Amino acid sequence: MIQSATNATTEPTTIDPRAGATRAPGAPPGLLRPGHNCERIERAQRFRVLIDAADYFSALRAAMTCARHSIHIVGWDIDSRLELVPGGAPDGLPAGLADFLCALAVKNRHLRIHILAWDFAMLYAFEREWLPVYKMGWRTHRRIRFRQDGRHPLGSSHHQKIVVIDDALAFAGGIDLTRARDYVAHDLHAPLRRNPDATPYQPMHDVQAMFDGPAAHAVGRLVRERWQRATGKPIESSPDLAREAPRTRRTNLWPAGVAADVEDVALGISLTAPAFEGRPLVAQIQQLYVDAIAAAKHAIYIENQYFTASRVGAALASRLTDADGPDIAVIGPERTSGWLQEATMGVLRAKLHEAMKQADGHGRYAMYAPTIEISGDIASANDDAHGQIINVHSKLMTVDDELLIIGSANLNNRSMVLDTECNITLEARGDARVRAAIASVRNRLLAEHLDVSPADVQAALRTQRLNAAIAQLRHGARTLTPLDPVVSGDLDDLASRVSVLDPEAPVAPQELVRHFLPEERSRPLTGKLLAFGALALGVAALAVLWRFTPLREAVSFAALVHEVQRIHASHFGSLAIVALYALAASVSVPVTLLIAVSGFVFGALWGSAYAFAGTMISACITYYAGASLGHDAVRKLAGSRINRISEKLGKKGLVTVVLLRVVPVAPFTIINLAAGASHIGLRDYLAGTVLGMTPGIVLATTFAHQLVAAVRHPSLTGLSLVALIGAALVGLSVILQRFFARRS
């Protein structure tokens, strides 16, 4: 471990009026501005950057064993099987995360543990732990609460990676408590680099910040706010903890043997939060990056999983045109994970990289990938090791020795405007101690990538600019390899079509539909739309309004999604959703649209449940309406074609209902009215509706929900699943259409 940065003698500091931040007399006021590029500025007694999961997980476990009142965990992914210390720690507690947390709860009756994970789509069941609600919720101790966070706009995700202990010690950065996070140095043959199923995974580089004091308490408040928005219920504070003032809260949670990079500093807390449910967009992280780049004088050092953010890229390109601008070094993975990621995010990265090169008239920009050279015999024995790369997952930037930004936000457009993110910023403001700490973190990172000592990095940077120093230090098997990503000819046209995968603004639901779902093309109702009873007239009038007036826009996919989310958050939300679904389906709102909305908003499981319940209730309502109106009225309402449907319903009701549900030759409401008018038995009608609608509802809601997930994190597995479901829908329709034609 590198010890704490040297406490160099500095000028006396004065108190900045913004949240107690300090700066030396005569120093500039600083970059961080609450409400502009950060949420708030709070002091930390100690601050440390933990490099890779090995350091983070061991420090986290040691701190959690000392928790008195609370442990709050939020993340994009959480795996109950994760061993924070592989093989077990000397604390005598279980190795697996879920069992370890349960043991802590049993040991300390005052401890409350809250775990909030992103409510991911079932698309990710192949990449994540199966049934996390069971693994981390139902089977755990009663004082451990596990919830999944789905309170965000369509297509976005909860992407923060935070742990807060007793509101006194916080961890924030890019590392989730999940699989495929390196425990050890990036050795190709490390026996511990294994998933829970014993399969090896690629070396992973990442960083996490650890800090205590009022800054940790402030992050704890953010977690509590997120929990309440996600669950509708507050986290109850321990009475003992509530009585402790943030500035006097216990400090013995800091893990023994882990030296702080710097002590007694001010930290900025910056957020991305999409506009949702009346709350405005918060884009502090994007503004922070733009401001930091504009303030750079000598060097900008970036580590990030992605490099596609438009505004950040424009700010960097602008500095490259300055005659006295900074060197810019971007560290990222050699290639993104999987061919689909490469064809989308990889294409966008190559486009931004090309724009950077064109702006770089002074030779100050370079992109690198951490790599490990391997011998041919090793490569042939392990295909995954051929051209071995270290997967960069960190989200960090340093500017000169003045600014350090670390957090969960990728340098893509999603993390700037759509996903929920949290970044922590350390700013020097003329403090030599902080400058030394920022330089130390950057030098440690470069030393790891270049397989040299931090002292070697510091010595090279004393006499050379950033990229020249990297070039001088590159040697051996472990190094930073220059990258020059390009867009191949067959992918060049794709670059203009994948913006929806990394949007520069929140994606409207109708935009997803436009990209991925064909517009509904149904023939207008025929026949006379006259008064055949109040219900029949209402159905006919609304059907006409839906197809030929602005009502179609007022009841658009976007409007339905927004209204459904608002209603579902109410006290009797579930019952209201089913009732509104049934009403909408009964008055000729296309049932396929309602099913799609259910899948997009509520996911495959709950979306199917709501769609099924609403469909069956609507089917009953309109069936009895048809029975009341009578055959003649229904025939005049729907046209002569309904006669053939009615005849078949009367002769072979069950089979015909099944076929009409799978291959709808008329709108849902009209079929139901015809069924009621034909006097088919209610039992056959309901049985046929269940048999005919259930497979389609499940497939359609699952398919709709997977589109959101595929947009959020495209992968080969995800695309295959979406294609499989789509093929099943199309194939089933074709088969039954042919069968129905033969039967006719």
Image (cartoon, grey):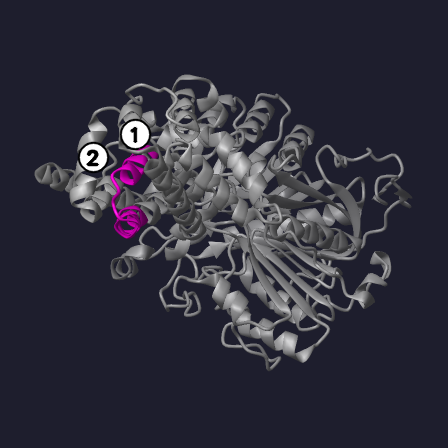
Q: Position of residue 151 (x, y in %)?
A: 57, 45
Q: Is residue 251 left or right of residue 652?
A: right
Which residue is painted at 44% across and 41% down in the image? 582
Select label 2 or label 1 by which is in front.
Answer: 1
* Location of mark 1 (residue): 634
Q: In this view, which residue lies farthest toward the left?
A: 742
Residue 691 forms part of the magenta stretch:
yes
Q: Name the main secondary structure of what is drawn in magenta.
A: helix
Cα separation, mark 2 vs mark 1, equals 12 Å
Position above or below: 593 against 246 = above
Q: Is residue 581 left or right of residue 716?
A: right
Question: For mark 2, what is the residue?
Answer: 645
Tell me where residue 16 sits by quadrant.
top right
> Is-magenta flag for residue 74?
no
Q: Residues within 10 Å of mark 1 (few under 14, many from 20)?
A: many
- Along the line of sight, the residue nearer the viewer: 67 or 516: 516
Does any portion of residue 412 appear in the rendered image?
Answer: no
- Residue depicted at 33% across the width and 36% down the height: 626
Q: Residue at 19%, 42% (x, y): give it.
A: 650
Task: Tell me the magenta residue range.
Answer: 669-695
The C terminus lies in quadrant: top left
**Crowd tier of the residue under label 2, counting other residues whose Cα lies within 10 Å: few below 14, some 14–19, many 20 or above:** many
Quarter of the figure that contains the N terminus: bottom right
Taking 65 as reference, is 269 above or below it? above
Residue 680: image quadrant is top left
Question: Which of these two is toward me, 706 or 259?
Answer: 706
Q: Tag 1: residue type?
A: Val
Percent across and percent down for residue 177 are 54, 60
Residue type pointed to by label 2: Ile
**Residue 186 horizontal/vertical position (percent):** 46, 60
Check disc 2 and report its element: helix, strand or loop: helix
Name the spot of residue 689 as percent of width and height, x first: 29, 47
